[in-house]
Structure formats: structure tokens, C-alpha cells
Amino acid sequence: MNKLPRAIRLLSAHGEAALRPTIDKGKFIKPMIPRRIAANIRNRALRDGTFGAFEPELGGWDPAWDSVRKVHMMKPYKGHARERNRAERARKVTASMEGMPARFEKLVKDANDRKPKQDIAYLFKRIQSLAPIIMPGKRTV
């Protein structure tokens, strides 16, 4: 007689308890059959046609042993932020463009007002400040 695999022997001896971890005296005890080997046994049962009933000599898989998995609901596609906010950005831009020519003229006028007036006194003062740079040996009054 062929010796049955260890996992099949554990399933026939302990049933579902061989697939589940336990906590004993506050310590985690891993399952007797690892999940990968349990998955291999389940897949072999599906291939061999023994899924649905477990026989200790033949093997198989009981559907009650399958772990209940959480069902994940699909979320709707969010898209990119630039596409989601496109209408809001368009409204914002059109609202800010309404008084733009007047604001632009005011900005140019303010910039010109901040500049010093370039009259004759300004030109003499500028020449006097540049004289040491242009003619380093000459002294200016």
C-alpha cells in the first residue's frame, strides 16, 4: 500500500482543524497544513473530480474547508484631477478674465509710477555715480 501524503493523513485525522491556526495559552500556533499545500490539494481534487467529498484513503476536498474571502466592490474610475476639476477651473478662469484689461493697464501704470523720473537732474546724478567706473583715474566733484 502506498503511503498517503502527510497533508492527506492530517486532514483525515483532524479534518478542518488541520487547516486553521489556533491560539494555545496566548501563543499563535500555525496550521498543521500550510495554505500553499492546502491549495495544491484543493486544485488536485478539482482536477481529479474528487472535489465535494473527502475520503481518507483517496483524498479530495470538502467545500466547507474553503476559507470565506471578503468580497471587494469595484469603485468607479476616479480619473485625473485635472479632468474632474476642468469645469470649475474654466469658470474660475473666465471669472478672473472679466476685468483683466483694466487690471493689466493699472499694473503697467503702477510699474511706471514706481520708476524714478528721468529728468535732467536724474541724468547728472547718474553720470556722477558712473564716473568712477568709466574713468577710474579722474576725480569728480
Image (cartoon, rainbow, N blue to C red):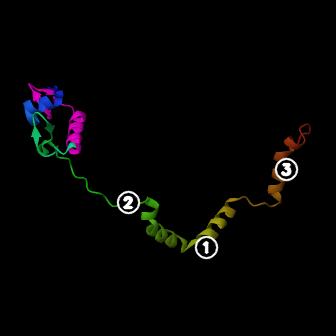
Q: Residue at x 37, y 60 (%)?
A: 77
In this rendering, would 20 be left or right of 85? left
Label 3 packing within 10 angstroms: few (<14), some (14-19), many (20+) = few
Dot 1: element: helix
Res 101 label: 1
Residue 44: % across, % down: 23, 40
Residue 71: % across, % down: 22, 52
Give the quarter of the image for residue 37: top left
Task: Find the residue positioned furthest to the front.
Answer: 1
Asked if labels 3 and 2 touch by Cβ distance under 8 angstroms, the answer is no
Res 127 label: 3
Looking at the figure, which quarter contains the N terminus? top left
Q: Could you tell me the amino acid type at mark 3?
A: Ile
Q: Could you tell me the amino acid type at mark 2?
A: Lys
Give the quarter of the image for residue 47: top left
Looking at the figure, which quarter contains the C terminus? top right
Q: Residue at x 26, y 56 (%)?
A: 73
Sequence-wise, the earlier of marks 1 and 3 is: 1
**Label 2 vs label 3, nearer the camera:** 2
Dot 2: element: loop
Q: Which residues are magenta?
A: 18-47
Separation (CA) of disc 2 from disc 3: 65 Å
Judging depth in this view, the residue of 88 and 39 nearest the camera is: 39
Q: Could you tell me the amino acid type at mark 1?
A: Pro
Which residue position holds label 2? 78
Dot 3: element: helix
In this rendering, would 75 be left or right of 91? left
Can residue 141 be seen here? no
